[in-house]
Image: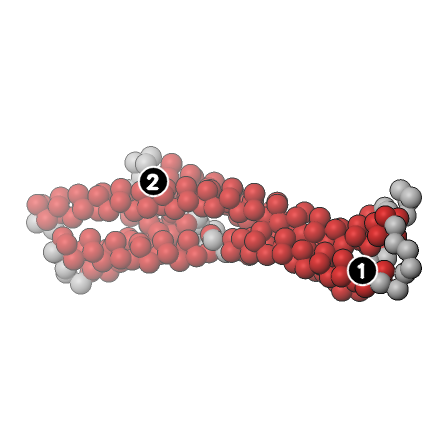
């Protein structure tokens, strides 16, 4: 009895529709795990690059030197460094046009950094919606397989004169495996989504804080240059 109701036996003896549902859920589960690990590694890299640049930024290095390094290292830089570079680029362009108005300079730099921030967040949030979809849809896909399997099982039992638990159990067990696989795909996706969303929120807050701090530094520089007459 135990051998007949093993998971492998149940999967192999399920109806074609239920087997297709199980295969789909297994593929979804593999894809979600791949997305989870890819996103974990990507966020770890983003955090490391942001921390590295932040230490360099507050170490006393001049803004021009930081901008030169960011321009040379644009391909391998982190989000914070690219946001800094976009703000400095716009600031220097406006300065080259002999614009001395503090509000105009600061608005241009802030707009450039906010646009860069949105681009960076779009990249960071890639594949997150996929995990949310897996977490919400997989149980229903598994439930569909279960309902179909139970319907198929009872249809087959309709021609029998005498129905016992032994004849009903295998068909129902085959169908319930579909729900189990659906939950197996959904639960890790939901847990990972919540964890990754929290980490991304922290990154976003850190980047927004940096934008405000850097804007204050630029504003002080503009004030100092205006006061000195340059």
- Where's residue 109, x and y in %? 25, 55
Foreground label between 1 and 2: 1
Residue found at x 75% / y 51%? 177
Locate residue 187 relative to residue 26 in the image: left or right: left
- Where's residue 123, x and y in %? 46, 56
Residue found at x 56% / y 46%? 190
Q: Residues within 10 Å of mark 1 (few under 14, many from 20)?
A: few
Quarter-of-image position of residue 17: bottom right
Residue identified by numbered label 1: 154
Locate residue 127 relative to residue 167 in the image: left or right: left
First in sequence: mark 1 vs mark 2: 2
Mark 1 lies on a secondary structure that is helix
Residue identified by numbered label 2: 57
Q: Is residue 56 above or below residue 189?
A: above
Residue found at x 74% / y 51%? 176
Q: Is residue 212 above or below residue 30?
A: above
Quarter-of-image position of residue 19: bottom right
Q: CA distance from mark 1 to mark 2?
A: 69 Å
Q: How are the residues colored? A: secondary structure
- Where's residue 149, x and y in %? 76, 59
Mark 2 lies on a secondary structure that is helix
Locate residue 169 relative to residue 50 in the image: left or right: right
């Amino acid at each position: 009895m135990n051998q007949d109701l093993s998971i492998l036996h149940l999967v192999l003896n399920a109806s074609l529709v239920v087997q297709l549902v199980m295969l789909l859920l297994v593929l979804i589960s593999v894809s979600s795990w791949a997305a989870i690990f890819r996103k974990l590694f990507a966020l770890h890299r983003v955090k490391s690059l942001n921390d590295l640049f932040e230490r360099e930024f507050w170490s006393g290095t001049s803004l021009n030197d930081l901008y030169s390094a960011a321009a040379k290292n644009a391909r391998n830089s982190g989000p914070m460094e690219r946001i800094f570079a976009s703000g400095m680029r716009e600031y220097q362009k406006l300065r080259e046009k002999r614009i001395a108005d503090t509000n105009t300079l600061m608005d241009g730099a802030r707009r450039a950094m906010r646009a860069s921030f949105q681009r960076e967040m779009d990249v960071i949030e890639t594949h997150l919606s996929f995990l949310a979809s897996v977490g919400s849809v997989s149980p229903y896909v598994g439930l569909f397989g279960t309902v179909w399997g139970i319907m198929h099982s009872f249809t087959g039992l309709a021609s029998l004169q005498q129905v016992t638990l032994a004849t009903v159990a295998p068909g129902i067990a085959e169908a319930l495996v579909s729900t189990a696989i659906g939950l197996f795909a959904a639960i890790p996706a939901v847990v990972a989504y919540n964890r990754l969303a929290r980490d991304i929120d922290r990154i976003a807050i850190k980047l927004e804080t940096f934008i405000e701090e850097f804007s204050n530094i630029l504003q002080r520089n503009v004030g100092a240059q205006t006061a000195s007459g340059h």
